[in-house]
Image: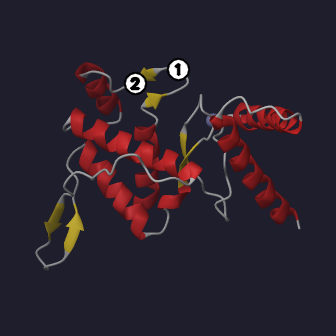
Amino acid sequence: MDTKAQGAALVVDALNSVDVDGGTDAWANDLDYLAWCASRDLEPGSRRDAMALRDTLREGLRAALSGRAPAHAGALPVLPVVRDTDGGLRLNPVDLPGAIAAAVVTLTIAGDWPRVKVCPADDCLEAFFDGSRNRSRVWCAMADCGNLAKTRTYRSRLHDSTGERPESLAHVIVGQTWAKGEVVAGDASV
Ligand SMILES: [Zn+2]
């Protein structure tokens, strides 16, 4: 795996340390956080920094789904940049928060940050890296998410056509995303 692929895998792994569907957080306390890092052979660093970074990134990705601005501005932790003996600068993360931040920077410079996405299903929100050629992937690897949303959109349209309001705003957002996915899928089949 090259640096970019490693960074993408780390970012997705870190984003999914919180399981929205299961209501669990692998970084909920110091012990769990240390165990999570140890199982991946990563230097833990500050759990607080790692969580702040993860939650800031997740909020930004969720906001991107619906085309709105994130509720809060968020800063990445200070980047671990070192100067080589030849005068050049390079990223040299020493712990998990630094490694996540460095990976985000690497992906951004490569133009691949928009490929990091979260599943639009409200009860899922699993992060994934969209490796598709035209960045058209919408849903996570769980086949249920796309199918469920399609059913909800259909129901929502039925409600609309009978003059009733959709069940929730979330359904509208999911519906729009699904509609976008359909357009992309349609283009691809031409
Ligand atoms: Zn999903």
Residue 131 percent coordinates (x, y): 61, 57
Q: Secondary structure at mark 1?
A: loop
Seen at 43% across and 60% down, the residue is 4
Residue 1 makes an appearance in the image: no
Q: Secondary structure at mark 2?
A: strand
Q: Nearer the viewer, residue 3 or 108?
A: 108
Residue 156 makes an appearance in the image: yes
Residue identified by numbered label 2 = 25
Seen at 27% across and 53% down, the residue is 75
Going by the numbered disc 1, the residue's amino acid type is Gly
Residue 14 percent coordinates (x, y): 40, 39
- Name the image quarter holding residue 53: top left
Q: Nearer the viewer, residue 182 or 90?
A: 182
Q: Is residue 69 left or right of residue 87?
A: right
Q: Is residue 54 left or right of residue 13?
A: left
Ligand 1 lies in quarter: top right
Residue identified by numbered label 1 = 22
Of the 4 image quadrants, the one containing the C terminus is: bottom right
Residue 48 percent coordinates (x, y): 22, 34
Q: Is residue 63 above or below residue 34?
A: below
Q: Is mark 2 within 8 Å of ligand 1?
A: no
